[in-house]
Image: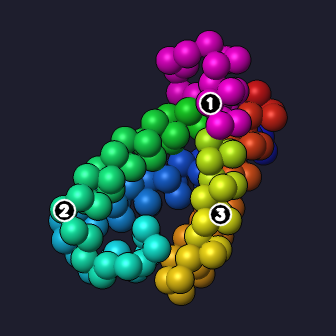
Amino acid sequence: MVSIVSSIIGTVLLLAVAVMEVLLIAGLPLGEFTMGGRHKVLPPMYRMFAASSIILQLFGAAMLLQGSGLMNMWFAGNVIKIICFVFAGFFAINTVMNLISPSKKEKYVMTPLAAVEACCFAITAFLM
């Protein structure tokens, strides 16, 4: 049950960030929440990074749902477990990077979000 709840929480957060990335690509002034907050509106090169981030967010959401049994598996269970641990590590590092960001918006919004994501992936991986 804990794995299902954590995977749903993680999936909702990943989808929310994917929506934010779409808005960044569309040119909305949300750049202070990402990539160090250097740009209010992301320049074209950074928008490509945002696009690749959407793919990563959606893949991570699928792995969480598969790891908790809420979605048919694309990979063997052991592979999904490893992928979830990799995502947990990625979001743990991302938590630290957001914490040291010069952008207050990134620091105070994205840091806890990344920390929760790291926990959701770790819980899902451990409970598989």
Binning the other alpha carbons within 10 Å of mark 2 as few (below 14), some (14 to 19) or many (20 upward) gives few
Q: Which mark is residue 44?
A: 2
Binning the other alpha carbons within 10 Å of mark 3 as few (below 14), some (14 to 19) or many (20 upward) gives many
Quadrant of the frame with the C terminus: top right
Say if 17 sits above or below 108 in the image. above
Residue at x 73%, y 52% (from the top left corner)? 119
Quarter of the view holding residue 117: bottom right
x and y, in percent, of residue 107 in the image: 58, 78
Q: Amino acid at mark 1?
A: Ile
x and y, in percent, of residue 114 in the image: 61, 61
Q: Amino acid at mark 2?
A: Pro
Label 1 sits on residue = 83
Q: CA distance from mark 1 to mark 2?
A: 30 Å
In the image as oriented, which residue stretches furthest toward the top?
A: 76
Q: Which one is earlier in the sequence, the residue at label 1 or at label 2?
A: 2
Residue 53 or residue 7, whichever sits in front? 53
Q: Nearer the viewer, mark 1 or mark 2?
A: 2
Q: Decide whether residue 112 is among the magenta residues.
A: no
Q: CA distance from mark 3 to mark 2?
A: 25 Å
Q: Which one is earlier in the sequence, the residue at label 3 or at label 2?
A: 2
x and y, in percent, of residue 110 in the image: 55, 70
Label 3 sits on residue = 95
Q: Does residue 117 appear in the picture of this structure?
A: no
State the extent of the magenta-drawn residues as a range: 65-86
